[in-house]
Image: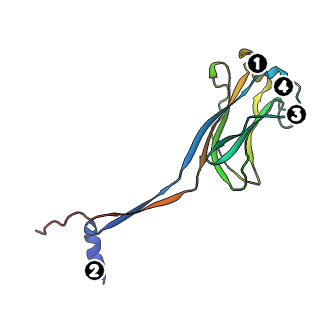
């Protein structure tokens, strides 16, 4: 038996082969949440928010939450921004960025992509210290009182395997 297996290894190129591959689907979308008349939000208070409309990516529903005066009194004088998953009945693994855009869609903040699994235990993730108030006022004034929070969101689907493809062996060559 040892001799046959050694022979099979030596002649592997003559044996039929199968293959399969693991695929992890991704679904990417961009949502722009425009805040108009930002000066009218001044004085709204800490922990008070405005939100985008619901948007769908990868079979999940999402919202952007914007807190013009932040989410807590921790000494940070600025705004907070979060991404919220409204479909927590099953986990949603995602990568996202939230960034502030000013006049002519110039990116004001430069946050790196965050990866998070949104679940019933944690349906939101984002930036408690998104942008300081003085910078936000400046951007708002430059753009007639408005700005955009852009979310670039990639939902990572469940991996699956496809395959079972048979690759026929090459034709046998005569032994010399």
- Please state the horizontal and vertical placement of residue 155, each as a whole percent of the image: 61, 46
Secondary structure of residue under mark 3: loop
- Could you say which disc has been placed on residue 41 in the image? 4
User: Which residue is drawn at the image coordinates 63% and 47% (left, top)?
Assistant: 94
Task: Say which label, 3 or 4, has the lower sequence index.
Answer: 4
Secondary structure of residue under mark 4: helix
Task: Say which label, 2 or 3, has the lower sequence index.
Answer: 2
Which residue is nearer to you in this view: 163 or 10? Answer: 163
Q: Residues within 10 Å of mark 3 (few under 14, many from 20)?
A: some
- Could you say which disc has been placed on residue 145 in the image? 1
Secondary structure of residue under mark 2: helix
The quarter of the image holding the C terminus is: bottom left
Task: Say which label, 1 or 3, has the lower sequence index.
Answer: 3
Task: Say which label, 1 or 4, has the lower sequence index.
Answer: 4
Q: Are marks 3 and 4 in contact (CB under 8 Å)?
A: no
- According to the picture, the residue beneath numbered tag 2 turns out to be 4
- Please state the horizontal and vertical placement of residue 151, each as a whole percent of the image: 66, 35
User: Which residue is drawn at the image coordinates 84% and 22% (left, top)?
Assistant: 40
Task: Say which label, 1 or 2, has the lower sequence index.
Answer: 2
Marks 3 and 4: which is nearer the front? 4
- Which quadrant of the structure image shows residue 175? bottom left
- According to the picture, the residue beneath numbered tag 3 turns out to be 46
Task: Say which label, 2 or 4, has the lower sequence index.
Answer: 2
Name the outermost residue toward the bottom: 1
User: Which residue is drawn at the image coordinates 53% and 53% (left, top)?
Assistant: 24
């Amino acid at each position: 038996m040892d001799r046959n297996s050694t022979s099979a290894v030596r002649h592997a190129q003559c044996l039929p082969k199968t293959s399969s591959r693991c695929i992890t689907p991704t679904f990417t979308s961009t949502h722009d949440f425009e805040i108009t008349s930002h000066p009218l939000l001044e004085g709204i208070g800490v922990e008070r928010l405005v939100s985008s409309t619901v948007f769908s990516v990868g079979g999940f529903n999402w919202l952007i939450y914007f807190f013009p005066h932040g989410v807590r009194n921790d000494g940070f004088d600025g705004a907070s921004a979060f991404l919220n998953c409204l479909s927590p009945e099953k986990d949603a693994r995602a990568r996202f960025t939230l960034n502030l855009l000013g006049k002519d869609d110039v990116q004001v903040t430069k946050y790196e992509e965050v990866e998070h699994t949104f679940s019933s235990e944690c349906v939101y993730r984002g930036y408690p210290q998104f942008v300081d108030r003085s910078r936000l006022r400046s951007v708002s004034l430059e753009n007639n009182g408005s700005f955009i929070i852009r979310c670039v969101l990639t939902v990572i689907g469940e991996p699956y395997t496809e395959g079972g493809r048979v690759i026929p062996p090459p034709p046998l060559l005569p032994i010399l």
